[in-house]
Amino acid sequence: MRAETRLWLAQRASAAVLALCVAVHLVTMIAAVRGGLTAAEMLARTRGSVAWAAFYGLFVLAVSIHAPIGLRTIASEWLGWRGRTADAACTIVAVALLALGARAILAVTL
Amino acid sequence: MSTLAVSVWRGGADGRFQTFMVPRLDAQTVLDVVTHIQRRLDPTLAYRFACRVGMCGSCAMTVNGEPRWTCRTHVANVEKNGKLTIAPLAHLPIVRDLVTDMREFFDKWARARGQFQPTKTRRDDVARVAPSSTGRLAIDAAIECIGCGVCYAACEVVAWNPDYLGPAALNRAWTLVNDVRDGAGRARLAAVAGDAGCHACHTHESCSERCPKHLAPTASIAGLKRATALAALRGEL
């Protein structure tokens, strides 16, 4: 019960973070590509930017918390897949999202 | 006199619809239609009712695909081209015809700790609860449930997660969470938290949409989510 309630809280909190992150991400993207944008220009902005890394680090963290908890519910309700194996699968998704996100951030900031 | 073509579910889960022609009357309710069928056309039809005035909660059925209290549902508001389809409530085992086995529905009230747990004895003074207090107002908004099962039949989460306690049981728990005289607070929050409890609710609001008493179980469940979240943060869950 406590675990379920904490997962629910974590998903709500990460959703609040995502609402802000997605908005900032979309606005930045639309503003940045106006008038064309090259890979070199992008990297010039992101390389060595602590602020960029911090923002997208938070974004990736929120996604890796939010998505697996949601998938766990979908697995339970639509596939009837519950219990340890479902929890393990969702943990793997969480770790994978975190690893892929972290890799992407490191690739464009370092 | 015009007639209604009424398709009525007959038999158990593997039953089928049977059509009856029923005279259309002014101010006729769906329960009047079912009663006419049983008294005049086929005495073997099984259905439940008691008070006929929207108090007892026994006559709920699926009318044209939606759960409704049949005694207060006028045919004029639900018939389509002179036709009615009447089936037992969804999400409950069918006993026969329009009668469902409501044991699971009421057992879930017990599982949600729907019983009042007194903290005083008859030798204590009567508790004073201000009508304007926050808890009492929350109770007032949720207390008029007649246990008809319409919300339970309307809830998609009940279909997806058979352990889900359902809107009515959680609504009942919420009234007790707000009752200052009750002593089972923590145990009740533990009972209603989690996958079978309030956290399974997707806020579709079908329960609030369909509740014949115009209650909002969704709001009660949201209250339970807040209460259990606070309890979890305080380490009391």
Image (cartoon, grey):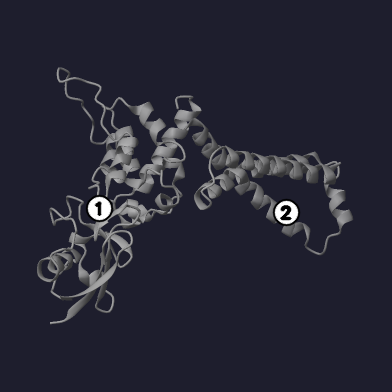
Element assignment for label 2 = helix
**Residue farthest to the right, as pictured:** A40
Badge 2 crowding class, 10 Å Cα cut-off, few under 14, some 14 to 19, many 20 or more, is few
Image side of residue A69 versus residue B124, left or right: right
The residue at which mark 1 appears reads as B213
Mark 1 surroundings: few (<14), some (14-19) or many (≥20) residues within 10 A: some
Mark 1 or 2, closer to the camera: 1
Badge 1 marks a residue whose secondary structure is loop
The answer to whether residue B178 shows anywhere in this view is: no
Give how far across and how far down residue A48 sits, in percent.
Answer: 85, 41
* Above-or-below relation of B82 to B231: below
Query: Do the residues indicated by labels 1 and 2 lie within the same chain of the protein?
Result: no
Q: Nearer the viewer, residue A20 or B196?
A: B196
Q: What amino acid is at disc 1?
A: Lys
> Left or right: where does residue B99 sit relative to residue A27?
left
Q: Nearer the viewer, residue A13 or B235?
A: B235
Give the chain letter at badge 1.
B
Mark 1–mark 2 CB contact (< 8 Å): no
In the depicted view, which residue is nearer to us: B224 or B112? B112
Q: Position of residue A23 (x, y in %)?
A: 64, 52
Question: In the rendering, which numbered label is found on residue B17?
Answer: none
Question: Residue B144's image quarter?
Answer: top left
Quadrant in which residue B88 is drawn: bottom left
Q: Which image quadrant: the C terminus of chain A?
A: top right
**Residue in the picture at 27% in, 50% down:** B101
How far apart are labels 1 and 2 at the CA level? 49 Å
| Amino acid of disc 2 | Thr
Name the residue tied to disc 2. A28
Up/down of B8 relative to B128, above or below: below
